[in-house]
Amino acid sequence: MSKKFAVILSILFLSTGCVGIDAPFKPPLGLIYTNVKAPLKTDLRGTNFNYNSGKAQTVTFQYGIWSFSVGDSSAKASMLNAYIDQADYADYEYVNVLFGLYESVTVITYGQDKDLKSSSRREAHCLKQSML
């Protein structure tokens, strides 16, 4: 009974790392090194392609069964980093080194900043945010 339980527990433990990233388009991933960029939206008809972009990143370090993750790779965080009011589309970048010893996920959003059109207003906004 305990041998069967140990086998089932080890299978469950080893299969937890197979979850991976969930996106509409998944490029092939390598085991030793992966660095891919892909869209989070595949239907781009009628999309206004803008040049303002913001990035947000989460980084994970893993050693054996111990892992440590830090960061906020949400679309909202990347929009705030670029002062974007409405995101038109988003991409992601995934980096994996040595079987997941180091991983990072970066979300890149693209859109327009309706309130901060001029660079002087953007600088004033940055200064105001840094004082808070």
Image (cartoon, rainbow, N blue to C red):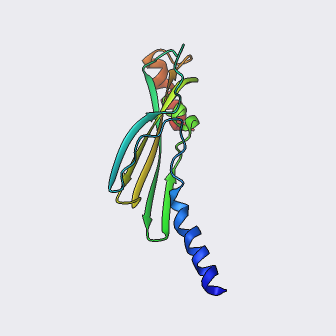
The residue lying at 52 percent from left, 33 percent from top is 40
Q: Residue furthest bottom?
A: 2
> x and y percent of residue 87 in the render?
56, 25
Placement of the N terminus among the 4 image quadrants: bottom right
Query: In the drawing, does residue 71 fall left or right of residue 32?
Result: right
The residue lying at 52 percent from left, 43 percent from top is 73
Judge whether 37 appears above or below 20 on screen.
above
Judge whether 6 appears above or below 97 on screen.
below
**Viewer-side residue, 52 vs 28:** 28
> x and y percent of residue 123 in the render?
45, 25
> x and y percent of residue 24 in the render?
54, 35
> x and y percent of residue 81 in the render?
49, 34
Counting the numbered discs, the total is 0
**Viewer-side residue, 131 vs 18:** 18
Residue 77, visible in the rendered structure: yes
Judge whether 49 appears above or below 64 on screen.
above
Residue 83, visible in the rendered structure: no
